[in-house]
Image (cartoon, rainbow, N blue to C red):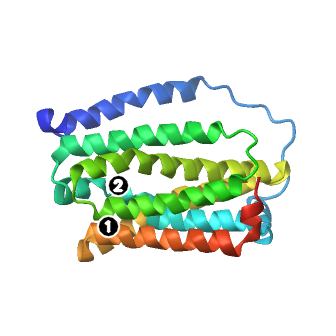
Amino acid sequence: MIETTGLATPFLFCAVSNLGVAIALVTMKPVQHQTRSEASFYQNLVEGLGYVRRTPAIFGLMGLMSVFALLGRPYVELMPVFARDVLAIGASGLGALNALIGVGSFIGSVAVASLGNYRRKGRLIIGSAIIFSILLTTFSISTWVPLSLVIAPILGFFTLFYMVGTNTLIQSTVPGALRGRVASIYGLVQMGLMPMGIMLEGAVGSLIGVPITVVGGGLVVLVCSGLGLLAVPALRRLE
């Protein structure tokens, strides 16, 4: 669309496509809660943070997700630089890269849902972060279009596999009474740090180049994931 009609049409198309989401939200019926916490927002926040700090497995998952959100996941928003400056494939090539990442992400989400009662989820999820970082580093240094197109869907697969898998482990491990508070902290870590990571990697990339910046981020994710898997036994025991 960009190459044939310009930028306005794709943005209009995206805006119209969100009408379905708006309609779905409007038609939802609110859940009637039978009980309501009498604690203040501050007390709930402190209690949730205290649980995260006291629980090595949850603290480790949160810490690794912080590194991932800040230095790993921002590669998606930096993809236009790879399409234009590294691979020289233009807007249509960028669309192909993002589409392939999207397909891999969808399959990754389905793969997590299909795990069922697999008993070594902790090792599997942290291992997926290690594979993700290796793929991200390889993609960043690639200047060969076919190789980049092959890596893109696999990279998308492990991106969502790790993100959804971590969320699943947290939701299924935390006691029900604290699940909402801890899930809120996880959401803040994941969605709050991601924009900061985009800004950070974009700023550094403008100085030393985006590919080398993304490589650096991938290596940090690799080191932290490996250390977490080796140094935090609670992560390996997560089922």
Q: Give SS at disc 2.
A: loop
- Residue at x 40%, y 60% (from the top left corner): 136
Residue 165, disc: none
Q: Which amino acid type corresponds to the residue marked 2 in the rendered image?
A: Glu
- Residue at x 25%, y 71% (from the top left corner): 209
Which callout, 1 or 2, points at the residue further toward the start of the chain? 2
Question: Is 191 positioned to the left or the right of 153 in the image?
Answer: right
Q: Quadrant of the N terminus?
A: top left
Question: Is 9 positioned to the left or the right of 49 in the image?
Answer: left
Other-residue count near label 1 (Cα within 10 Å), few / some / many at <14 / 14–19 / ≥20: many
- For disc 1, the marked residue is 202
Question: Looking at the picture, how far across and down is residue 37, in whole percent?
Answer: 84, 50
- For disc 2, the marked residue is 77
- Residue at x 12%, y 33% (from the top left corner): 4
Marks 1 and 2, how far apart in space?
9 Å
Q: Can residue 45 be seen in this snapshot?
A: no
Question: Looking at the picture, how far across and down is residue 17, in whole percent?
Answer: 38, 28
Question: Is 201 positioned to the left or the right of 88 in the image?
Answer: right
Name the one closer to the observer, 161 or 25: 161
Residues under numbered marks 1 and 2 in contact, where contact means CB atoms less than 8 Å apart: yes
Name the one closer to the observer, 67 or 189: 67
Looking at this view, name the residue that lies furthest to the left: 4
Q: Give SS at disc 1.
A: helix
Name the one closer to the observer, 31 or 159: 159
The answer to whether 182 is drawn above or below residue 63 in the figure is above
Name the one closer to the observer, 223 or 13: 223
Q: Which amino acid type corresponds to the residue marked 1 in the rendered image?
A: Gly
* Quadrant housing residue 109: top right
The answer to whether 82 is drawn above or below residue 102 in the figure is below
